[in-house]
Image: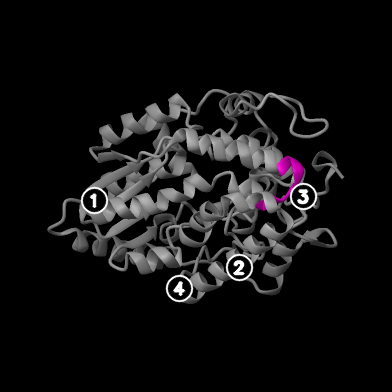
């Protein structure tokens, strides 16, 4: 069944074509889980109190140091808004750390350089080989064409995971004890690397990160990686990169990073704060942040490679990032199902312009599969 003709969950908008998320009748298993084990609504007053405590702890740890925190920025929507909040609302001294990928449009690059300067933050650019990044992405797509496994799609972004290592190294070199990241809980989509297909985003908006969860995640990654090596011998060539990008640096909260840098704490700001898409968009408009040409959504606007990943995920699993992202927000109660369906008509559409941009960067001038329409 094609996704265009798919039935969607009657609670969220998850399509029933997604192999990772089974359905019980007309309802996806994630919504069924919330029905049987509903989560309590997070208390906004308590969340604000805890956030203020956390900010004061960051400020205290920053005393006598050159910066209160290092902030990972991509030029995208959420990390740009995060830098605004930290510098203007909380008045923290921030070092913005940035890597321009091969898939970063000039508009995005211009956004972050201009806005960082306007906000008065210092800026440090990570230097990784763009040619290496581009080559890994292309080679993983070639492997995917022979074995359509969703983990291969995520491996195409393996070089980006090395940024967690680089950011920790910068924090250590600069003597900074806190790194703040701008990912929000609704971005924990089930097709993303390192996210459990059983993870349910509900109204509590909580994400528990402790030693036990880190160990479980590491073991799950080892198990999944081992299975991929058995079924796809071509990825053996990338074993070292695979270990680094998954087990060691898959996220800022990876067990290896916690053990390697015990005096540096990584914080996901929006997991403690109440993330408001409306306030984020309004702030970005004031800052003059712009979408790249042909970009249908402000989410993931910082990377045109996300467009080709959507194509591959749709072909492999019958789902795109937008399906999962909007479904998470519906389940969490921050968006109605009708609004999600309406927005999906625009923001969920593939952009031929962005897809062509990605293909040109990678030098992909042949169809990826039968029926593939070259963007």
Mark 4–mark 3 distance (CA, rounded to whole Å)? 32 Å
Q: Are circles 4 and 3 on residues that touch, CB within 8 Å?
A: no
Q: At x 44% / y 44%, what residue is drawn?
A: 78
Please tell me whether mark 2 or mark 1 is closer to you in this view: 2
Q: Out of 327 and 230, give the one closest to the viewer.
A: 230
Where residue 317 sits: x, y (%)?
A: 75, 49
Which residue is label 3 attached to? 15
Mark 1 or mark 4: whose residue is earlier in sequence: 1
- Quadrant location of the N terminus? top right
Which residue is label 4 attached to? 210
Please tell me whether mark 4 or mark 3 is closer to you in this view: 4
Q: Are circles 1 and 3 on residues that touch, CB within 8 Å?
A: no
Mark 1–mark 4 distance (CA, rounded to whole Å)? 26 Å
Please tell me whether mark 1 or mark 4 is closer to you in this view: 4
Please tell me whether mark 4 or mark 2 is closer to you in this view: 2
Which residue is label 2 attached to? 220
Q: Are circles 4 and 2 on residues that touch, CB within 8 Å?
A: no
Tell me the magenta residue range: 144-151
Q: At x 72% / y 24%, what residue is drawn?
A: 374
Mark 4–mark 2 distance (CA, rounded to whole Å)? 16 Å
Which residue is label 1 attached to? 92
Mark 2–mark 3 distance (CA, rounded to whole Å)? 25 Å
For disc 2, the neighbor class at 10 Å (few under 14, some 14 to 19, many from 20) is: some
- Quadrant location of the C terminus? top right
Please tell me whether mark 2 or mark 3 is closer to you in this view: 2
Mark 1 or mark 3: whose residue is earlier in sequence: 3
Q: Is residue 184 left or right of residue 114?
A: right
Mark 1–mark 3 distance (CA, rounded to whole Å)? 42 Å
Is 149 covered by the magenta stretch? yes
**Relative to 146, does residue 293 appear above or below in the rendering?**
above
């Amino acid at each position: 069944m094609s996704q265009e003709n798919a039935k969607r969950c009657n609670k969220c908008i998850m399509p029933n074509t997604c192999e990772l998320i089974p359905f019980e009748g007309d309802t996806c298993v994630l919504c069924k889980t919330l029905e049987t084990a509903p989560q309590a609504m997070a208390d906004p007053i308590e969340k604000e109190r805890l956030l203020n405590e956390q900010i004061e702890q960051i400020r205290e740890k920053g005393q006598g140091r050159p910066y209160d925190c290092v902030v990972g920025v991509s030029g995208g929507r959420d990390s740009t808004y995060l830098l605004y909040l930290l510098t203007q609302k909380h008045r923290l001294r921030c070092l913005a750390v940035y890597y321009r990928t091969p898939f970063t449009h000039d508009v995005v690059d211009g956004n972050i350089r201009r806005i960082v300067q306007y906000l008065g933050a210092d800026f440090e650019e990570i230097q990784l080989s763009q040619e290496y990044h581009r080559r890994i992405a292309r080679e993983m797509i070639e492997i995917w064409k022979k074995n359509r496994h969703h983990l291969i799609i995520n491996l195409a972004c393996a070089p980006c995971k090395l940024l967690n290592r680089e950011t920790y190294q910068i924090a250590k070199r600069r003597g900074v004890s806190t790194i703040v990241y701008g990912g929000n809980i609704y971005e924990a989509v089930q097709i993303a690397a390192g996210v459990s297909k059983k993870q349910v985003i509900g109204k509590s908006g909580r994400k528990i990160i402790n030693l036990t969860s880190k160990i479980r995640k590491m073991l799950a990654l080892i198990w999944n990686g081992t299975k991929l090596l058995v079924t796809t011998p071509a990825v053996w060539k990338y074993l070292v990169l695979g270990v680094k990008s998954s087990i060691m640096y898959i996220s800022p909260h990876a067990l290896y990073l916690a053990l390697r840098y015990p005096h540096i704490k990584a914080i996901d700001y929006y997991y403690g704060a109440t993330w408001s898409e409306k306030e984020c968009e309004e702030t970005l408009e004031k800052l003059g942040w712009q979408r790249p040409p042909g970009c249908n959504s402000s989410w993931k606007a910082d990377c045109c490679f996300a467009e080709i990943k959507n194509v591959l995920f749709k072909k492999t699993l019958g789902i795109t990032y937008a399906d999962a992202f909007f479904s998470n927000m519906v389940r969490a109660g921050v968006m109605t199902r009708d609004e999600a369906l309406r927005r999906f008509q625009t923001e969920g559409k593939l952009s031929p312009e962005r897809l062509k941009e990605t293909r040109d960067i990678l030098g992909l001038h042949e169809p990826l599969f039968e029926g593939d329409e070259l963007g």
